[in-house]
Amino acid sequence: MREILGRRLQRLRSSLQSVRFRAGSRPRGGDGSESPDPLDAALRCATDWQWPVLPGVGRSGTDERRCACPDPDCSVPGAHPFDPGLLAATTDARMVRWWWTNRPGAPVVLATGGRGPCAVSLPAGAGALALARLDALRLRPGPVVATPSRWSLLVAPYSLERLGELLYAQDRVPSSLRFHGEGGYLLLPPSGVGAGGRVRWERAPLPGGGRPWLPDVAQVVDALVEAASLERVPPA
């Protein structure tokens, strides 16, 4: 009996090791799915979610710390549109395929506002505080995009007037907050950010057809302002 149980235990261990090997054989995204390549990600945004996208300029081929654009002092190296310009952002699958077939490693850039979501971004530490605050209040956040240095919470499109009203009601708005509205842009996963880093989903859009759900900016702005303020306070 001991021999039989021993053999069964060994087979179970072997099976578990096999499953772990298969699960760990490829990188996985923040939503638990296998990380897509930029073309797959761009097509999902454009066709499934109807978010207008275009390829980013990317990094220099000789120095990944520098942008591939002509500006030697580019403030957002690799993380902005160049050719085509932002106004070319589209949801057309044929155009998306053409772009990323010709530039397969190009970053995926979301054109914010209008047909796409808007976003509010803040330093990564403050972003984690903001999500914890929203969870504690049982307020549902939308998708959250993360880089090693900043987190961006996607929200429903807002106007400058609406945003201005919300911020005017705050006692103080930290300068570390950034707002990505009409005419803005945001890098989406799995774009690279230099030094081997990548954009990832901290909170991925829920699987299923149609556009991902997005909260109104009014639902999250208090938590974001509070978190950005707290992160700036040095520990006692």
Image (spheres, rainbow, N blue to C red):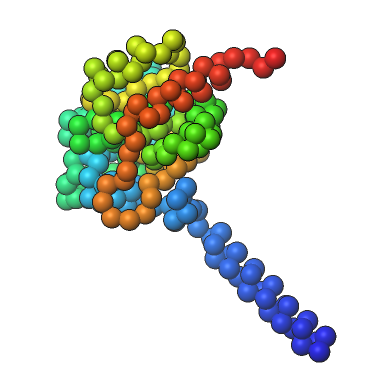
Q: Which residue is rendered at x = 73% and y = 78% of the image?
A: 9
Q: Which residue is rendered at x = 32% and y = 52% of the image?
A: 40
**Exactly how many numbered labels are in the figure?**
0
Q: Is residue 16 visible?
A: yes
Q: Is residue 58 visible?
A: no
Which quadrant: the N terminus?
Answer: bottom right
Q: Is residue 113 left or right of residue 21?
A: left
| Residue at far right of view | 2
Query: Could you say which quadrant of the image residue 81 lies in?
Result: top left
Residue 97 lies, in percent from the top left, at: 22, 50
- Return the residue nearer the eye: 220 or 199: 220
Q: Which residue is rendered at x = 45% and y = 31% of the image?
A: 151
- Return the residue nearer the eye: 4 or 81: 4
Residue 43 lies, in percent from the top left, at: 27, 50
Which quadrant: the C terminus?
Answer: top right
Q: Which residue is rendered at x = 53% and y = 35% of the image?
A: 136
Residue 129 lies, in percent from the top left, at: 54, 29
Query: Could you say which quadrant of the image residue 165 lies in?
Result: top left
| Residue at far front of view | 137
Query: Could you say which quadrant of the image residue 182 lies in?
Result: top left
